[in-house]
Amino acid sequence: MAPRVLMLPGFGGRADQPILVQLERALVGRGLTATRAALPPGPPSPELEREVALAREIAGTDPTIVAYAGRSFGGRVLARLALVLEPRALVLLGFPVRSAAGRRRPQDEVVLAMLTCPTLIVQGAADPLGPVRTLRRLAAKNPRLELEVIASASHAFGRGQRQAIEAAASWLAQRLG
């Protein structure tokens, strides 16, 4: 069985979020597989317990799931799950260490500092929710974190989406191939 990547969308997104569908295609082209899942609707639970429990249930039912990839809010959930289940690899697409109002999310910074699995953060250079300066500082403190900055992108990647997908798929293929 080919290694499988569990993928979660951004906040309010569905399993068929375009960036996840395109990432899945790129992974299949590299001999990997993926499971896309949606998160529960509505406001997030405290400390994301409900969302992490759902992701843990999905990951626990398929032994071929060996890596995770999360878009924005989905990345926040999977980063917390990675602290518990420690996948072989984790990709965070647009990791939001700031709220939409610009407030710090110190717990998300702590989670990044605690990760022990190889982790790639793919971030838009102009992403106000994940300032590159902050992520560089965090990556410098944790040797398991790698940061790929997409120069032409913000939080939604826009024209930089293809480059973000290619970076994520190539990195995962190297770790899992």
Image (cartoon, rainbow, N blue to C red):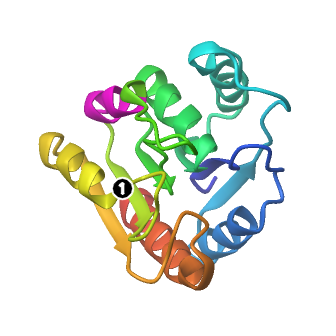
The picture places residue 21, in percent across and down from the top left corner, at: 75, 67
The relative height of residue 118 versus residue 176 in the rendered view (above or below) is above
Q: Going 14% across and 48% down the picture, which residue do you hit?
A: 140
Q: What percent of the width, then of the height, locates residue 73? A: 61, 42
| Spot occupied by residue 95 in the image (x, y as percentages of width and height) | 47, 49
The stretch of residues the image draws in magenta is 108-116
Residue 171: name its quadrant. Answer: bottom left
Q: Is residue 111 found inside the magenta-colored segment of the image?
A: yes
Asked whether residue 3 is drawn in magenta, I would say: no
> Is 27 in front, or is 131?
131
In this picture, is 45 found above or below 14?
above
Q: Quadrant of residue 44?
A: top right
Which residue corresponds to mark 1?
A: 131
Say left or right for 91 vs 148.
right
Mark yes or no: residue 29 visible.
Answer: yes
Q: Amino acid at mark 1?
A: Pro
Residue appearing at x 43%, y 31% in the figure: 105
Q: Residue at x 22, y 55 (%)?
A: 136
